[in-house]
Amino acid sequence: MPTKKVNKVKEVLDKIFRDTDAAYGLKEFENINFDDALDITEEEKGKFYIKDIKSGNLRVVFDEEKQKGRPEEIIRQLWVYKLNKQYQYPLDRLDIEKSIHFGREIHAKAADIIIYKKDKITPYIIVEVKSPTEKKGIDQLKSYLSAEGAEIGFWSNGKNHIILYRPYPKEFDDTLPDLPMASQTIDDLLEAKKTLLDYTTTKADLKQIVESMEELVLANAGIDVFVEVFKLIYAKLYDENEARINRSDQEIYFRKYKDPAKTYAVINDLFKNAMKKWPGTFYEQENINLSPEHLSIVVGELEKARLFGSDLSIIDEAFEHLIPEVAKGKKGQYFTPRHVIAMAVKMLNPQKNENVIDPAAGSGGFLISAMYWIRDKYLNGKNEAMQEYAKEHVWGLDFAEEISKVSRALMLIAGDGRSHMFKLNTLDPREWQGEDSLLLDARAKLKTKLLDLGNSADNADNQKTFHYFNFDVLLTNPPFAGEIKDSGILRQYFFGKKKGKLVNNIERHILFIERTLDMLRPGGRMAIVLPQGVLNNTNMEYVRQYLFDKARILAVVGLHGNTFKPHTGTKTSVLFLQKFDKDEKSPKDYPIFMAVSKKAGKDNSGDYIYKKDAAGGFVHDAKGRKVLDHDLDEIAEAFIKFAKEQKFKFT
């Protein structure tokens, strides 16, 4: 078969990157026209070659018969193209597959790309490329830099990259925010002014950035990784916000400077200002505890991310990675997958004048989803209007220090529903007392949402106990683990007593069932994630009877066993109900919507599963994100149809 020029390079790339997702596997090259950059030919039937940009030699990249591709070769050629066209390095300063010399020995493996200084002799930048599924290779790159005496190392798998900078012969104690242009020195790059427009992308994978930070320095820095990264995120949020609103040139200060001491001074000042603007997350006397040298490395990575306007699921995933196990699984708290959250919000259909609460708010996922629901359905997609809604109508409580910090940060990014996010123990309002300024603020605001019980004596008591609230919609995934044994807590609950006597202990989520119902106004509705046993086990019949007495059961959705993996394989259900109005009685018989999810969107290991098209490529939504392979959207649609048939008031 004669040589056949491939006109639609993307079709070949889809075959090569089928298992890694072409769109995401080549995220580093979103602004490149692949048809212009890559010269791919079909030399034999089903056998595709790429012409090396430097040498003109042909390299095989895909064998259709064997279904075998070389994605790393595509990534290498794209970087050669980008280095030449965008960074302006002449091809005669580039070498491809250059053997590495270790003393007198020549290393068997060659460096993918070497960029020389203007003398075309001295190695300047060494580039190591990998397939999108590869995450390792930093140590190998360091050995190449040491052997060749190059100052800059660049590692990329097409989705992400890491830049190492070593002022030879020092150790690898710095990173760079970007590669220098051919016309720039490293000092030029570090001193160059940056603006918000230089960080227009919001697709940076924060989890990947955090993992890179850990690999480069954090894991061995002797600090609490979560706390220090969170401080930096708070500082970066403040800087982005100031650049958007208060700086005419939108200059960004959160970046790496030539002098590590200056980097530390600037970033620590941003952190201090963030604490003043958004108090209640850190103590006023706190500082960033990373050394200036370590901070320079971390900032070099983190400055790549744009937080405001980002996809919150990406940021949420990074926080889930960061939060230590003691703050999650050991307390029975797990981040609720966003497709579960989306189903619950869609089914309860919050209205723009309704107050929404999550009394176990975690990272704020339910509340953020409710805010976006209101924005898109009732506010014409306007973020400013959503922010005004959130300031008045969105409420969240959580007792875990680390997780409550996450929720406040995510609320800041989403649109400042942070006004009513409180670090409180939902199950024990006794702990809400005290003269601390944060407690005083929380009590004052929560008193505005107490239920009017109809007489002054009951209302006065309710002002002290915070027992009955007036919320319209409640969405929550309470912690499952642990038993409550504190008699002071048990005394506050119906479930804390049996035949007039206090029980010795009771599971935490059982008390949450009672507590959440008491937080709803008459006619209010809620969705709560519960262990399936609450709805199935014979010894839980008393709980089910309590529910039937207090509310109409709207729906029960059994979640797939993989939904909360890898954290737990506990079988769970989402219970939807509507609290009876004041004088309403439970009907003797009524239909309840029942469904069981057969497709979790996760495999047995807890890794996400994405939909694929007929050709085996990943399916993407309108925003370019891979679509999870789950059935909760269909379940939500079926419930909406059922609810309309039953003439539920909130549909």
Image (cartoon, rainbow, N blue to C red):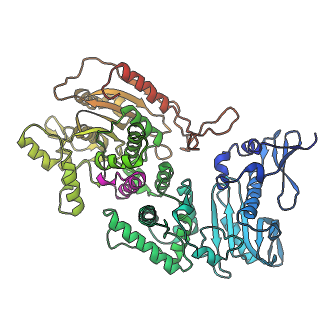
Q: Is residue 226 visible?
A: no
- Please indicate whether residue 389 sits to the left or right of residue 136 in the image: left
- In percent of width and height, residue 309 lies at 48, 53
Whether 419 is among the magenta residues is yes
Q: Quadrant of residue 500?
A: top left
Residue sitting at the far front: 248
In the depicted structure, whether residue 611 falls above or below residue 465: above
Q: Position of residue 140 (x, y in %)?
A: 70, 67
| Magenta span of residues | 396-421
Rendered residue at 74%/62% (across/down): 85
Quarter of the N terminus within the rendering: top right
322 with respect to 486 (left or right) = right
Q: Give above or below for 184 relative to 380.
A: below
Q: Quadrant of residue 341?
A: top left
Where's the C terminus, which quadrant? top left
Q: Is residue 169 above or below residue 213?
A: below
State the residue at coordinates (46%, 66%).
Answer: 248
Q: Position of residue 115 (x, y in %)?
A: 76, 70
Quadrant position of residue 470: top left
- Magenta span dominant secondary structure: helix
Tell which of 511 and 368 is nearer to you: 368
Q: Position of residue 19 (x, y in %)?
A: 68, 44
Magenta span includes 620: no
| Residue at image coords 79%, 52% | 38
